[in-house]
Image (cartoon, rainbow, N blue to C red):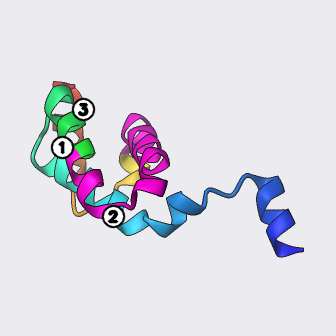
């Protein structure tokens, strides 16, 4: 019953399973103030190293979605300050 409930709700198992890895990469991207071309290269390179192939595409999709939607309410636990986030968003 749990499985059918989870599937009907659209539970993203990859998002949950690799939460720490995704958050770590997002924090690195912001802290290093990476611009778009380098960000893409970094994401694909790191995902190839740390995420199994079967989950990689969805992991990358989730990560790009998080970067696109990131704001002050979503930086807790990333190890970045609001100032660093705003500076990174400005260079994008």
Q: Which residue is mark 2?
A: 21
State the image coordinates of residue 11 (x, y, percent, origin top left).
68, 58
Mark 1, secondary structure of its residue = helix
* C-alpha gap between disc 2 and disc 1: 13 Å
| Residue at the outermost left position | 32
State the image coordinates of residue 89 (x, y, percent, origin top left).
24, 32
Instruction: Answer few, some or many: residues within 10 Å of disc 3's Cα (few below 14, many 20 plus, some between 14 and 19).
Output: some
Q: Which residue appears at 36% of the width and 57% of the height? A: 22
Q: Earlier in the sequence, mark 2 or mark 1?
A: 2
Which quarter of the rendered picture does the N terminus lie within?
A: bottom right
Q: Which residue is mark 3?
A: 89
Q: Which residue is mark 1?
A: 42
Which quarter of the rendered picture does the C terminus lie within?
A: top left
Mark 3, secondary structure of its residue = helix
State the image coordinates of residue 77 (x, y, percent, origin top left).
33, 67
* C-alpha gap between disc 2 and disc 3: 21 Å
Is 16 included in the stretch rendered in magenta?
A: no
Residue 16 vs residue 18: left or right?
A: right
Q: Earlier in the sequence, mark 2 or mark 3?
A: 2
């Amino acid at each position: 019953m749990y499985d059918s409930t989870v599937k009907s709700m659209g539970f993203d198992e990859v998002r949950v399973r690799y939460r720490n890895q995704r958050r770590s990469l997002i924090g690195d991207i912001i802290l290093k103030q990476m611009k778009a071309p380098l960000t893409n290269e970094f994401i694909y390179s790191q995902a190839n190293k740390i995420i199994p192939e079967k989950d990689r595409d969805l992991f990358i999709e989730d990560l790009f979605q998080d970067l696109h939607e990131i704001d002050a309410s979503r930086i807790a636990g990333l190890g970045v300050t609001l100032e660093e986030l705003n500076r990174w968003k400005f260079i994008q």
